[in-house]
Amino acid sequence: MKKIVLSLVLLIFASAVVFADQSDMYVRTLHIAKIYPTRDGYRVVYRMDDGLFSDFYVPMSWFDPSVGKAELVVGPDPSYPYFSIFWQDGKFDFVRLYVRVDPNDPSWGTLPGDFDLQGKFNITTLDLKWQ
């Protein structure tokens, strides 16, 4: 009987430790239609659920590990480009961009010189549209 009680106590303790460290993490992954590198960051154009396009801007400073709001994964994977955006407890946490290694890939673009980037990278969070 002592072994059963001890086993149950250990099981409850282990379960409490596991569930205590869990928080409300949510992730969404979408295809990138075009990504534009700039000196201030990246403009990302993506397709929403309704088939229309939208964009968002990722400041270069977010890629600094001390800031930790963005990560760039570069590779030849045929599923690239896409991005995953993560929310922790209902608030934006970070974004991970998966992009093609070849800068000549059609997914990479160049913004025209007169494209207005004024204030686009002066942000602290991402608030994306899905549809």
Image: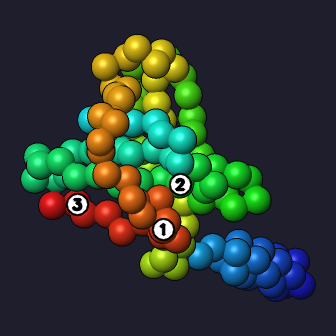
Answer few, some or many: residues within 10 Å of disc 3's Cα (few below 14, many 20 plus, some between 14 and 19): some
State the count of labels.
Answer: 3
Nearest the viewer among 83 and 58 is 58
Query: Label 3 amino acid?
Result: Trp
Q: Secondary structure at mark 3?
A: loop
Q: Is residue 84 left or right of residue 73?
A: left
Tell me if residue 73 comes above or below residue 27 in the rendering.
above
Screen quadrant of the N terminus: bottom right
Where on the picture, by quarter, is residue 66? Answer: bottom right
Label 2, label 3: how many angstroms apart (C-alpha)?
Answer: 21 Å
Q: What residue lies at 55% left-to-right and 67% top-to-bottom?
A: 93
Q: What residue lies at 69% left-to-right and 80% top-to-bottom?
A: 20
**Disc marking residue 130:** 3
Answer few, some or many: residues within 10 Å of disc 1's Cα (few below 14, many 20 plus, some between 14 and 19): few
Q: Earlier in the sequence, mark 2 or mark 1?
A: 2
Residue 73 point in image, percent of width and height: 57, 35
Tell me if residue 125 comes above or below residue 61 in the rendering.
below
Q: Is residue 27 left or right of residue 23?
A: left
Q: Are marks 2 and 1 in contact (CB under 8 Å)?
A: yes
Q: Which residue is mark 2?
A: 59
Q: Which residue is mark 1?
A: 123
Query: Label 1 amino acid?
Result: Ile
Point out the frontmost of discs 3 and 1: 1
Residue 31 point in image, percent of width and height: 30, 39
Label 2, label 1: how many angstroms apart (C-alpha)?
Answer: 8 Å
Residue 3 point in image, percent of width and height: 87, 78
Residue 45 point in image, percent of width and height: 29, 44
